[in-house]
Image: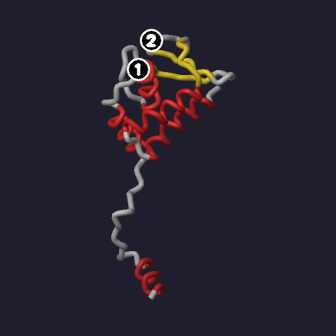
Amino acid sequence: MTPVIRQVAKRPSMRLPMTPNDTPIRSPDAIRQSCAAKLRGIEISGQFIAMLGCLLRENWTTPMLVEMVSTSDGHLLGRCEGEASCQAFLGATDDLIRNIHGVAKVAELDGDEVGYLVARVTEVKKRR
């Protein structure tokens, strides 16, 4: 019986129906938008909102945090719009990752959304 299933699955005109456990693959932008929508209503500190907004490319604060860089000792500096360089001390990179995991539970972020945020922090760390 298994060979018949394989033959049917290989036919280009036939598609196997999706089961409830199958989820479509989302684009990175769809993951970003979903993550932003879930986080938008969560009450957290203004600095953390600015940092999440920067990671998600969302304008959630005034002034907007437009860039974060990681120092060699694992700290984050930020640049607000209108500033020439990163001058604002934001805290430790490890604390940001820990806080992302904490808010993920409250906002009910899925694995893709948590992964997206952690990957964005990793990008910041690589820009040293």
For discs 1 and 2, the disc positioned in front in the rendered view: 1
Nearer to me, 82 or 113:
113
Numbered disc total: 2
Nearer to me, 111 or 65:
111
Q: Is residue 85 left or right of residue 108?
A: right
Instruction: Determine whether 86 is above or below 59 in the image.
Output: above
Name the residue that disc number 1 marks: 45
Disc 2 residue type (three-letter) = Gly
Disc 1 residue type (three-letter) = Ser
Residue with the most extreme left position: 41
Picture residue at 48% right of the left edge, 33% below the top: 100
Image coordinates of residue 63 in percent, x first then y, are 39, 14
Image coordinates of residue 3 in percent, x first then y, are 48, 86
Mark 1: give few (<14), some (14-19) or many (20+) Cα within 10 Å.
Answer: few
Residue with the most extreme bottom position: 1
Q: Quadrant of the N terminus?
A: bottom left
Q: Which mark is residue 119?
A: none
Image coordinates of residue 99 in percent, x first then y, are 49, 30
Name the residue that disc number 2 marks: 82
How far, Cα to Cα, is label 1 from label 2?
Answer: 22 Å
